[in-house]
Amino acid sequence: MKSILLVDDDDTTNLVNSFFIRQLDSTLKVHMVRNGKEAIAFLQKASPNEDLPCLLLLDVNMSIMNGWEFLDVYSEKFDDQLKEDVVIVVLTGMDLDDNVMAMTHPSVVEMVQKPLSDIKFRALVTKHFFSD
């Protein structure tokens, strides 16, 4: 893993998530954007060898462009190679509709209930990047 993109409009959540990530691996680049529109722009500009995130943690409820709108644009705009390189995990509260939508979307590999903790993050990384 080289880089992670946090997509959440809550600055405190981004800072806490960034802290957990850096505690586990201080060499990871952590990028933060506040909504889906900024995430799309980030991915369009990202260099595959440097800034392209291996993991994208996506909040569902955001202003400007929410997580579901992001996923719709992401599915249409980006090629299959990028989609293979980026693991998308939805971070959400305890909403059953969110769970169903997240787990049926082809770009989403997992849904994790907020708040993220170091244990949850470690489990995500192990499951998606180090399991055989």
Image (cartoon, rainbow, N blue to C red):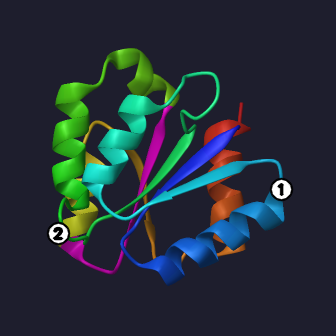
Identity of the residue drawn at 61% across and 41% down: 128
Image location of residue 16, percent across then percent down: 62, 78
- Please state, as top left, top right, bottom left or bottom right, where the N terminus lies in the image: top right
- Closer to the chain start, of discs 1 and 2, is 1
- Does the magenta-highlighted stretch encompass residue 74? no
Quadrant assignment for the C terminus: top right
Residue identifier under label 1: 26
The part of the chain drawn in magenta is 86-96
Disc 1 and disc 2 in contact, CB within 8 angstroms: no
Which residue occupies 18% across, 39% down? 73
Q: Quadrant of residue 49?
A: top right
Residue shown at the point (82%, 55%) measured from the top left = 25
Label 1: few (<14), some (14–19) or many (≥20) C-alpha neighbours in 10 Å: few
Left or right side of 65 for 23: right
Residue drawn at x 31%, y 42% is: 40
Q: Position of residue 83 (x, y in %)?
A: 39, 27
Which secondary structure, mark 1?
loop
Q: Is residue 104 above or below residue 1?
A: below
- Residue 80 locus on image (x, y percent): 35, 17
Q: Secondary structure at mark 2?
A: helix
Residue 51, given in percent of the width and then of the height, sits at 58, 35
Q: Is residue 54 left or right of residue 94?
A: right
Q: Against 129, is 16 above or below?
A: below
Is 55 placed left or right of 131 in the picture? left
Measured Cα–Cα span from mark 1 to mark 2:
35 Å
Q: Amino acid at mark 1?
A: Ser
Q: Give the amino acid type for the residue marked by disc 2 in the picture.
A: Asp
Compared with 11, 110 (above or below) is: above
Mark 1 vs mark 2, foreground winner is 1
The residue that disc 2 covers is: 97
Q: In this figure, what is the number of numbered marks?
A: 2
